[in-house]
């Protein structure tokens, strides 16, 4: 019997990667004024990954990584006003409307009537909290956990804190690496809902997935019947 | 009877404001190369406060506010290499050794044998978590809560989640605004330990404090006897 059902937030309940890709495109244009380098995007992604250990996930980290990459890629020729443009791009992301995925509201509303629901998300604490509030979905969740990483230890700590055993727990999300693998490995139920795009960092290899038991939902509307079958 | 004793972290268990002031002094020097403005410090602080609603607390927010202020104060003349210097200042803060306050370790160690201890702190999620780990005090705390603000609603939510009533709760910290007032107002026990300096934003007026019951400890070593008297 399931005692706790948890959802990822970004790109599981609302669109997020679109926003990053849009801002990234404008960043490429901005830096492209100074250099015809064809590795702007690659360098930005390398900087993001290299900074994860210092900065963690989220919009502020991404903004700092954009600034660092811009200085780096332009050999310091980026101007103060262009740095201000990059700050503005980051600010826009923080203020962007929360655009729910089709069906998210109905499914979460419905499940909240029969299950104890939790949101487990990485990112900036304040940003994720305000997105939950702006999403209008906050009241459907008994608990919201913003975490600095989603590995097995994180999930085990969450379950311990709530007195739930892995077989009583289901996690639903769009990242095989963060939502599916660690949960399946500890004996919980994982439901994967692929999103239209996946951040490079969240990719996992076929070998890592070999033999790992999880279910796949085409859209969030398929989640309730999958949960019923657990 | 106390069921839960919570400590603030920055400038209660380890030095933090010193680090901000040191970095701020180097920021003033850096921006001072471009302008003899006497409002650099004031503008930085205004920018920090104005950005709290977007960015929240912590080193990443402070770094972004330094960059914004630098562009602003220099009319865009700040160079790319100087922006990289500011990023480096922020990175240094994230990597700085955790410098415990005198007595913090003994007191926390001792209290952990008789009380359920919690850490409640504002700031960047990952930064605060790694500071707890580096402090060597992590094992003394049953729970670590990184929160986006410390108001009455935050404390009420924490207490509810742990099944603790306000009279069974004590909070210890160096901020009247964040650690003392909201806890005293909801009927909890608050112990104030003044730190050598207080961030402007955390100041409260004498009127706000009028009639609010709380205890003051000269140093953290005075906390155990104060708790025993509750």
Image (cartoon, coloured by chain):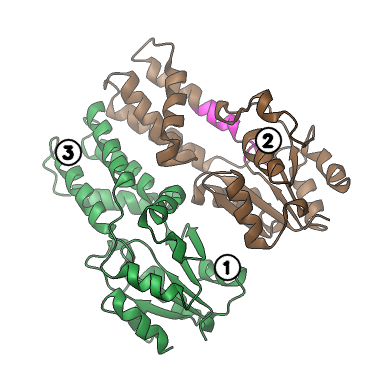
Chain colours: A green, B brown
Q: Residue at x 31, y 40 (%)?
A: A91
| Marked residue chain, label 3 | A
Instruction: Please say whether residue B21 is one of the residues in the magenta stretch.
Output: yes
Q: Secondary structure at mark 3?
A: helix
> x, y percentage for residue A143?
52, 64
Give the camera-side residue of B201 and A213: B201
> Any magenta on residue A179?
no
Lower sequence index among marks 3 and 1:
3
Q: Label 2: few (<14), some or many (≥20) within 10 Å?
A: many
Question: Does the image show residue A153?
Answer: yes
Name the element at disc 1: helix
Q: Check disc 3 and report the residue beneath it.
A: A30
Q: Residue furthest bottom?
A: A229
| Residue A5 screen position, x and y as percent | 47, 75
Query: Are both tags, 1 and 2, on one chain?
Result: no
B217 lies left or right of A162: right
For the C terminus of chain A, the image quarter is bottom left
Compared with residue B196, is residue A161 higher up or lower down, i.e. above or below? below
Residue B29 lies, in percent from the top left, at 44, 18
Instruction: Determine whether label 3 and label 1 are within 8 Å by CB.
Output: no
Q: Which residue is mark 2?
A: B174
Please give the range of residues in magenta: B10-23
Q: Is residue A79 visible?
A: no
Q: Quadrant of residue B74?
A: top left
Q: Mark 1 = which residue?
A: A157
Given the image, what chain letter belongs to the residue carrying mark 1?
A: A
Please report the residue visible at 38 percent of the width from the left and 19 percent of the height from the top: B31
Q: CA distance from mark 2 to mark 3?
A: 44 Å
Residues indicated by labels 3 and 1 sit on the same polypeptide chain? yes
Residue A21: x and y in percent read: 22, 53
| B77 over B212 or under it: above or below | above
> Looking at the image, is mark 2 or mark 3 nearer the viewer?
2
């Amino acid at each position: 019997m399931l005692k706790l059902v948890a959802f990822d937030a970004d790109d599981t309940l609302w669109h997020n990667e679109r926003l990053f890709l849009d801002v990234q495109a404008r960043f490429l244009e901005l830096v492209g004024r100074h250099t015809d380098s064809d590795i702007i995007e690659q360098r930005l992604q390398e900087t993001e990954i290299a900074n994860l250990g210092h900065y963690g996930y989220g919009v502020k980290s991404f903004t700092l990584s954009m600034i660092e990459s811009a200085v780096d890629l332009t050999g310091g020729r980026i101007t103060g006003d262009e740095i201000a443009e990059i700050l503005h791009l980051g600010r826009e992301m923080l203020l962007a409307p929360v655009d729910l995925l089709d069906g998210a509201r109905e499914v979460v509303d419905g499940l909240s009537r029969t299950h104890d629901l939790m949101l487990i998300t990485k990112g900036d604490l304040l940003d994720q909290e305000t997105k939950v509030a702006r999403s209008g979905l906050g009241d459907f969740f008994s608990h919201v956990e913003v975490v600095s990483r989603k590995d097995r230890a994180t999930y085990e700590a969450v379950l311990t804190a709530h007195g739930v055993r892995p077989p009583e727990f289901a996690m639903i999300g769009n990242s095989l690496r963060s939502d599916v693998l660690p949960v399946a490995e500890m004996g919980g139920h994982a439901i994967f809902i692929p999103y239209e795009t996946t951040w490079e960092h969240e990719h996992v290899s076929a070998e890592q997935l070999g033999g790992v038991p999880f279910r796949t939902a085409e859209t969030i509307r398929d989640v309730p019947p999958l949960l019923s079958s657990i």
